[in-house]
Amino acid sequence: MIEGREVVSSVGAIAAQPQEAARVGARIMEQGGNAFDAAAASALASCLLQPQSTGITGYVLCAVVRDGATGEIWSLDANSVAPAAAREDMYEILPASGDPKDLNSREYGCSVRDDANVFGPLAVGVPGMGAGIGTLWERWGRLEWPQIVAPTQQLLADGPQFGGTAGAVRSLEDVVRRYPATARQLLVDGRLPEPGDIMRRPGLDRTLERIAQAGWRDIYRGDLAREITDFVQEAGGILTFEDMAAYEPRVTPTLSITYHDATVHGPILPNGTMTCLQILNMLECFEPADDADVMYWHRLAEVLKLAWRDRLQYLTDPDFADVPVERLLSKDYAAGLVERTRQFPRWVDDLPARFPPGVMHGTLHLSAADGEGNLVSATITQGMAFGACFVAGETGLILSHGMCRFDPRPGRMNSVAPGKRPLNNTGTMLIETPERFIATGLPGGRKIVSVMARAAQRFIDAGASPLEAAEAPRMHVEAAEPAQVTESLGDEILDGLREMGHEIEAVAGVAGAMHSADFDRVGGTVRAGGNHWAAGIE
């Protein structure tokens, strides 16, 4: 097994974090599994190893996959769904607190009584993660299901250390202690964990054994579903067994555009990649510019503002509103949006912010490819750290807080409604160029959208490798400035942007670790890499 930040293989490779999750995926391929088996096993292992970021009952798995046997490319949408009893006025709305740690104040301009849409039983929507893992394996994998679960069972038996999870527990200590079942999972003999402490996760061994033997659908239609929903309802939540049993991930054609000589595919709404596609359409309206030129970054900032205004005004679950997808992704619409920038190249849009800026959340991304031409780009998340921070009794399962991804205020595009899927910020992509197929994505909350559009441009226009794309300078700006730019861009460009009139914040990093995998269409080799970890087999 080859390990490092970028690996090349003739058989298969996966880029993911934590490190052991990447190793799990590589070992699955060594056992004869394909990229889909590896991605499913790696995602499941991540649920144990980094529970603040994702979980078996986390709120979303969003993926774009390529079936090497048929050449077909699919969107896999395993987003959370609001329970049937949900209603748009179910939360008590209060004035914004101004606390940067308050998700509602930060993203929706209000507060919610007791943060009920973020923590606890009323924050729990139907979780998509387990069904997403199961569908990824069931539709395209080839190993037996118990083989997918076995590595996570072994990791639990070996006793993983808390590592960085200890810091996440510390930051949410008051919420963790609020719920006894959660405290039993995340504290050590009643105290805060240290990084070297072992995560015992009482009850999770029984749950994993149940999932391995009964199958992933037991989470939704079996004994586990009963145990989860009974506990949520006893605690005052609205999730029912019927909500769980009715849940199905959606496997559909992708949303796709052309950009120069490439085709870029993203998952369907309400996942976030559509905005990345819109950004690429606008960038294509300009003559190519070198990213060592200040005008490149000026232009990118202006395009990001336009895309974010559309995103926050129009995008939601299209089953609940008329979202003009065809118009938003049309080349003519993109040309109209950027015409002012084309006519006045140095003009800086300094309109005041109409929407509060977002921050990075707890999310992971993994990309896998194999020598048969199968590729997986999958983003997996709890939303914010530990989701609802609410464990379902003795199951050991930390439940999702899909409800906090809706706007808690009534009458908005993304307000709560029964059966609705919340808008999310995933930037999951699969890119086809004449030379290669590329699966790519990263975590980072709202910053994902801005960073992934530039990454796609780098892959296509500059021929970047997975590691080169991950380590390139980044920018994020939403509907209005300030724009965040990584310090690695250098003082000359930062000063140049400020001289043009931009409000610039130079920061150490924008969004999280990017993980990509590509398949060479000519040579048949596989390459995977990212900011942190990749593993492959020779």
Image (tube, grey):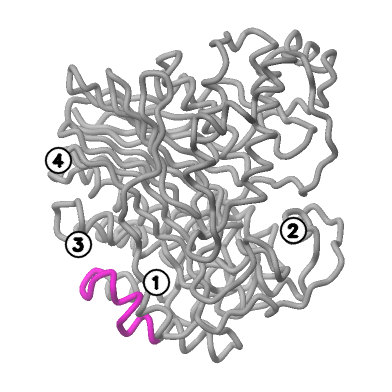
Q: Measure the C-alpha gap from mark 1 to mark 4.
A: 38 Å
Q: Measure the C-alpha gap from mark 1 to mark 2.
A: 35 Å
Callout in the foreground (3, 2):
2
Amino acid on which the number 4 mark rests in the picture = Thr
Q: Looking at the image, can residue 97 be seen?
A: yes
Task: Look at mark 2 in the image and give the residue it sits on.
Answer: 108
Task: Look at mark 3 in the image and give the residue it sits on.
Answer: 145
Amino acid on which the number 2 mark rests in the picture = Tyr
* Pointer 2 local density, CA inside 10 Å: few below 14, some 14–19, many at least 20: some
| N-terminal label among 4 and 2 | 4
Q: Secondary structure at mark 4?
A: loop
Quarter that holds the N terminus: top left
Q: Measure the C-alpha gap from mark 3 to mark 2.
A: 41 Å
* Pointer 1 local density, CA inside 10 Å: few below 14, some 14–19, many at least 20: some
| N-terminal label among 1 and 2 | 2
Quarter that holds the C terminus: top left
| N-terminal label among 3 and 2 | 2
Callout in the foreground (1, 4):
4
Q: Which residues are magenta?
A: 212-226
| Residue 167 horizontal/vertical position (percent) | 64, 53
Q: Measure the C-alpha gap from mark 3 to mark 1.
A: 18 Å
